[in-house]
Image (tube, rainbow, N blue to C red):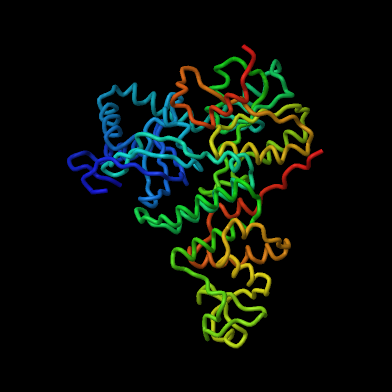
Amino acid sequence: MTSRERTYRIEGIIIRRRNIGEADSIFTIFSNTQGKIDAVARSIRKPRSKMRGHLETMVQSSLFVARGRSLDILTQAQTIDSYQEIRGNLEKSAAALYCFELVDLFVEKGEPLPELYRGLKQFLEVLKATSSPLSVRYFELYLLNLLGYEVRVFECVVCDSRLPEQTALLVPEAGGLVCGNCRLNTGPGRLIPVPIIKLFRFAARVSLENYVTIRVTEENLNLLRLATIDLIRYHLEREPKSQYFLENLPPPPQKP
Amino acid sequence: MNSFSGVPEPLTRLINELSKLPGIGPKSAQRLAFHLLRSSEETTKALVIAVEDMKKQVDLCSICFHITDKDPCQLCQDEERDESVLCVVEQALDVIVLERTGQYRGRYHVLQGVLNPMEGIGPEDLRISELLQRVQSGNIGEVIMATNPSLEGESTAMYVQRLLTPHGVRITRLARGLPSGADLEYTDEITLAHAFEGRQTF
């Protein structure tokens, strides 16, 4: 696309929506070719708007965008997938929103990241079919890895020696696991038992589809969650707002 | 604060204050301020008094959290209304719109927003615990979830449903489908799917 073109077409996933004015909304779209963009849809909240149902958080759409002076303007939208299976489930919706927030916080505007776009699409596809909390953990590690914050889990980040089959220290500041011998020379960290180290390693080796089939105890799931949150918090220098919601959902009602 | 050269300071202040209102940009604020400047003193005084009275006298109903100048509000005091049905809405404006239909004769509960995890709006920021208390203490048989059919509205409805289900109350959701004057060609798949699900004998 040249800078002279006044309009452009993208395929994107809407990751955020903010209502402005009487009936307009600004959408944050993570797209295949343009990366993260903000674009406004005029009169979208009016019932007669033709784009209304096609522009909503967690909808993958084919979009036609006109370049604006300060904000680009959405002129046409056609739903590709509305992820009904996710939006009808509170846990899945919360998980998707959390990952959208991660993308929003980690990715700069206008930086094309086609691989991350494919990864986000794949995450949503897997989330349709499974409720495994491992999907979120995988996406966190995938995102960190892709954006250059790879977590080293095979060798000690200090001495480069192969990590033995024993508890290691995860030091976000150092970028991975630290062996027993080097522990005293690093910053603060979290002790990671062997099953969690294996979960980290699997995430680097297998696909998301395979990762979510791993059987994990509640205790290990929680340890993995705490470890990945340490990493996210370190790189963002804060916790994503949607994390609290995801972790504090009321239990689903018991079926009679 | 923005300053406008050649514009007296009080007028600049008014322009700045007006431009903080939703949907009012700097140009509109300027137009409104100059209109007020040209208006009679009577007109501007009436506006000032109306704004002051609104701030002093209008508050939230302690039962349903709808806006009111009397507590409890008119809708909560109306004995003709069905106490066993509760319609849960996002904001006070929704009550006004629903009342305009004349179709609903039950009570309301205004949540004062919707769950929006990405903006950091959680259940503790809404009137969800008060809704739970009303259901626990009253003789409510049905709760109608009338939050918007957006992702946030749906999430809020599902969240509330989870909290209310153990209390044995019937929870319903407003029907969804094609709006009057809609064009099938431009209708999204979510709306069409709901329209098919909710179809009725003709």
Task: Give the quadrant of residue A112.
Answer: bottom left
On screen, residue A134 above or below A197: above
The image position of residue B49, as x and y in percent, is 42, 27
Q: Give me the residue at 52% from left, 39% from top.
A: A82
Q: Give me the residue at 44% from left, 67% from top.
A: A148
Looking at the rendered image, the quarter that the C terminus of chain A falls into is: top right
On screen, residue A159 above or below B147: below
Residue placed furthest toward the bottom = A181
The reply, left or right, for residue A5 in relation to residue A129 is left
The image position of residue B123, as x and y in percent, is 62, 45
Foreground residue among A252 and B195 = B195
The image position of residue B184, as x and y in percent, is 47, 22
Task: Give the quadrant of residue B14.
Answer: top left
The reply, left or right, for residue A228 in relation to residue A47 is right
Q: Give me the residue at 55% from left, 41% from top.
A: A83
Foreground residue among B109 and A152 = A152
Foreground residue among B58 and B49 = B58
Foreground residue among A220 and B65 = A220
